Amino acid sequence: MAYLGKLRLGVNIDHVATVRNARGGAYPDPLRAAKIAEEAGADGITAHLREDRRHISDVDIDGLMEVLSVPLNFEMAATDEMQAIALRHKPHAVCIVPEKREERTTEGGLEVAREENKLAHFIAPLREAGCRVSIFIAADQRQIEAAARIGAQVIELHTGGYCDAHAEGRFDDRDRELDALREMSAYAHSLGLEVHAGHGLTYDTVKPIAEFPEVMELNIGHFIIGEAIFRGLAPSIAEMRRLMDEARA
């Protein structure tokens, strides 16, 4: 099957804010990171405004909306507070993610099938405001079908299980996870959904996902920000971009 379009790279800047917040003050500045990412070839910037504001802040979102010339993908929980913020800013895209205060990072996909009616009503005003609505879910047929029914335009498949299995040397599990991601990418596309993927991707794990012809965007953050400590942010992004393009060639 031919590729369906350019594979876009969204760079998540959350953990620039994590480092800033560890000490307080203004440095390092997530907005500066976003602009460097844009100049280095990022096709979009992702930022997750969590309810506890552990990294990205409201002021960061205000600033990103002012300075970016690439699209902002605003990650958020399905709460009234976050909906109001998104409707005020009207970012290019909003990605609805599950969120628990005690977790270190987003641990799994959103349970769409169980909350179908609630989520359908939640995303309707966002779509009416012109935001592209994405739902962050596991590679599970039931969740994908529910995402399509509630009116989401995009799904982002959670690649964390695949990446964790690779890192831990559980290669049979890794291959099963990869097969499920491949199968569900094709299935979601057949339902008319645009397919994105992300969570935990590294230089070692990105290429098999980038090879899926239906995947049109990868959102990568923690690894890129960590790698930037050693080689700089722009070169870290350029290397990820190179691997993605190589996989598509």
Image: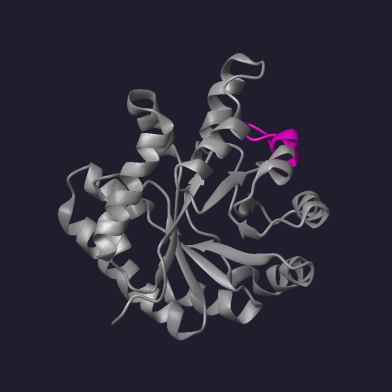
Whether residue 5 is situated above or below residue 137 in the rendered picture: below
Q: Residue at x 57, y 64 (%)?
A: 135
- Which quarter of the figure is the C terminus placed in? bottom left
Question: Is residue 60 within the magenta segment?
Answer: yes
* Position of residue 185 in the picture relative to residue 96 (left or right): left
Q: Which residue is drawn at 38% across and 56% down?
A: 159
Residue 83: x percent and y percent? 77, 56
Residue 236 showing in the rendered view: yes
Q: Which residue is drawn at 47% across and 53% down?
A: 108
Q: Which residue is drawn at 75% across and 65% down?
A: 126
Whether residue 39 is situated above or below residue 154 in the rendered picture: above
Residue 177 showing in the rendered view: no
- Residue in front for this viewpoint, 96 or 229: 229
Quarter of the image for residue 61 reads top right
Instruction: Specify the color scheme.
Output: one colour
- Which quarter of the figure is the N terminus placed in? bottom left
Residue 24: x percent and y percent? 65, 16
- Residue in front for this viewpoint, 101 or 155: 155
- Residue in front for this viewpoint, 148 or 240: 240
* Position of residue 177 in the picture relative to residue 45 (left or right): left
Q: What stretch is highlighted in magenta?
A: 52-62
Question: Is residue 205 within the magenta segment?
Answer: no
